């Protein structure tokens, strides 16, 4: 069982005035002595700020909005605990994530269980602890019904993930198609059991633009009007929100990333209009992941080697593209060079340098053609790495690095995940027959 004491092994306190985001050179030197040549940094205050701004924006247009944080985006326990402290819900999509939430002491009533492949055992756990289960498919429905039939004196709360078309957009592969008889059969089956309470509806789509959120909200409200003519407990529009982006990343997006207030104005206003005058309007759940956590993590890696190969200058660092972008997407993540307490400014003597990872893959390049004066022993700081990097980094060539947390005005730094060790990775292999 995990607890609130996860990985609280060591703490470093460094006073460094006048540096609000990221670490100073002095802090990096202290941290590297204890934690090695590469590590992640989680900035607690930045996460609190993102959560509170998103909650405030939505509450202003629809008061009964609740944030359910997407565990799959980054399930670092310190982050999940912070969500609970801030009053958020846990949005989980697997037995592993459900068990993590329970192990961290998250109450069942604060857990939303989504996902296409829920095991029967995890469904039973979710029902017994009082979690909200969103049914994703006909097989999911059958499993939920079978487990529900074994319940004694209480009813489990469920919702249905709906799949509907949005003009000009590809249909999702998840959820129950609202235009088929299957949806009515599921609704009728749930309501006839006496063991389940159908409380609301869920949807989620991959598109992140404002129009997608308008269309998905209109779509789910239309289904709700049909299935719940009198009263509905919740509407869940999923996630996919943009968060804060530096200009270097904003300009790479296909559409201009909306602000939290713009999302809230579209979604919240539609819900407020739909449920106006209702004595007990439903909860509006939103399920952000990237929007809350992406810009709250940084990755630090020491420059280990610099070589010239033909016309190329290559700096090899104690990290990999998989530390910052597991899909090796062609995003130019914000990066700065730190050395002797200062960030290098571009000079006429600086050269283009490729930042290469420690793996044996030719494609392991964290940045191509960075214009900077980089020396062995410097550290590179990559920001906006909190989304999916931690959870999708494979143990390829080397296991993953520690995570440190920077907290409060005192800038105390503590370890919230130890460096992965080879022994723990190899312990699951069977070496003797």
Image (tube, grey):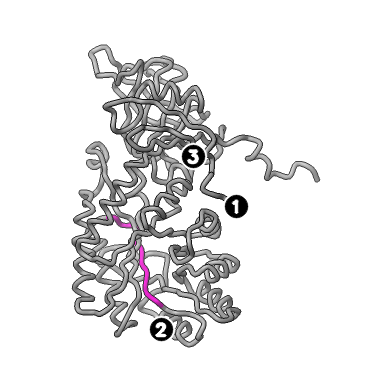
- Would you identify the image quadrant in which residue 9 lies? top right
Secondary element under disc 2, as helix, strand or loop, is helix
Task: In the rendered structure, find residue 1 and report the number of the disc placed on it.
Answer: 1
State the separation of the CA atoms marked 2 and 1. 40 Å
Please rate how many residues cluster around mark 2, counting C-alpha atoms within 10 Å: few if below 14, some from 14 to 19, many from 20.
Answer: few
Name which residue lies at 41% across and 29% down: 300
Q: Which residues are magenta?
A: 199-208
Using the image as rendered, state which of residue 354 and residue 267 is in the foreground. Answer: 267
Vertically, is 283 above or below 401? below
Between marks 3 and 2 in the image, the one whose residue lies nearer the viewer: 3
Residue underneath mark 2:
184
Q: Secondary structure at mark 3?
A: strand
Q: Nearer the viewer, residue 216 or 235?
A: 235
- Residue furthest toward the top? 349
Task: Compare marks 1 and 3 and give the one earlier in the sequence.
Answer: 1
CA distance separating discs 1 and 3: 16 Å
């Amino acid at each position: 069982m995990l607890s609130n004491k996860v990985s609280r092994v060591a703490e470093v306190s460094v006073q460094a005035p006048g540096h609000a985001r990221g670490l100073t050179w002095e802090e990096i030197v202290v941290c590297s002595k204890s934690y090695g040549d590469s590590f992640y940094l989680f900035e607690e205050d930045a996460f609190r700020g993102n959560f509170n701004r998103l909650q405030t924006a939505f509450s202003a247009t629809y008061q009964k909005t609740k944030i359910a944080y997407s565990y799959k985006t980054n399930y670092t326990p310190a982050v999940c605990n912070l969500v609970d402290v801030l009053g958020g819900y846990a949005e989980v999509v697997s037995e592993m994530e459900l068990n993590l939430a329970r192990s961290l002491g998250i109450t069942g009533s604060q857990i939303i269980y989504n996902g296409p492949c829920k095991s029967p055992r995890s469904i039973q756990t979710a029902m017994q602890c009082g979690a909200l289960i969103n049914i994703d498919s006909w097989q999911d429905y059958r499993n939920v019904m079978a487990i529900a039939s074994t319940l004694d004196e209480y009813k489990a709360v469920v919702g249905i993930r709906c799949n509907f078309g949005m003009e000009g957009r590809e249909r999702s592969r998840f959820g129950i198609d609202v235009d088929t008889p299957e949806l009515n059969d599921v609704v009728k089956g749930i309501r006839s059991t006496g063991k389940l309470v159908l409380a609301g509806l869920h949807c989620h789509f991959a598109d992140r633009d404002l129009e997608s959120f308008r269309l998905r909200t209109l779509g789910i409200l239309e289904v709700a009007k049909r299935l719940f003519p009198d009263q509905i407990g919740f509407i869940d529009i999923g996630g996919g929100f943009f968060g804060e982006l530096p200009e270097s990343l904003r300009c790479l997006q296909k559409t201009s990333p909306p602000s939290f207030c713009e999302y809230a104005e579209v979604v919240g206003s539609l819900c407020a209009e739909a449920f106006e005058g209702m004595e007990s309007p439903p909860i509006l759940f939103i399920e952000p992941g990237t929007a809350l956590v992406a810009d709250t993590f940084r990755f630090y890696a020491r420059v280990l080697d610099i070589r010239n190969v033909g016309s190329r200058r290559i700096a090899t660092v104690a990290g990999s593209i998989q530390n910052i972008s597991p899909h090796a997407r062609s995003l130019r993540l914000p990066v700065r060079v730190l050395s002797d307490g200062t960030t290098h400014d571009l000079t006429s003597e600086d050269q283009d340098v490729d930042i290469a990872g420690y793996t044996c893959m030719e494609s392991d390049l964290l940045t191509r053609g960075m214009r900077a004066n980089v020396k062995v022993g410097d550290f590179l700081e990559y920001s906006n790495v909190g989304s999916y990097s931690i959870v999708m980094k494979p143990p390829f060539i080397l296991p993953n690095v520690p995570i440190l947390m920077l907290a409060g005005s005192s800038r105390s730094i503590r370890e919230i995940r130890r460096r992965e060790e080879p022994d723990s990775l190899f312990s699951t292999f069977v070496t003797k027959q």
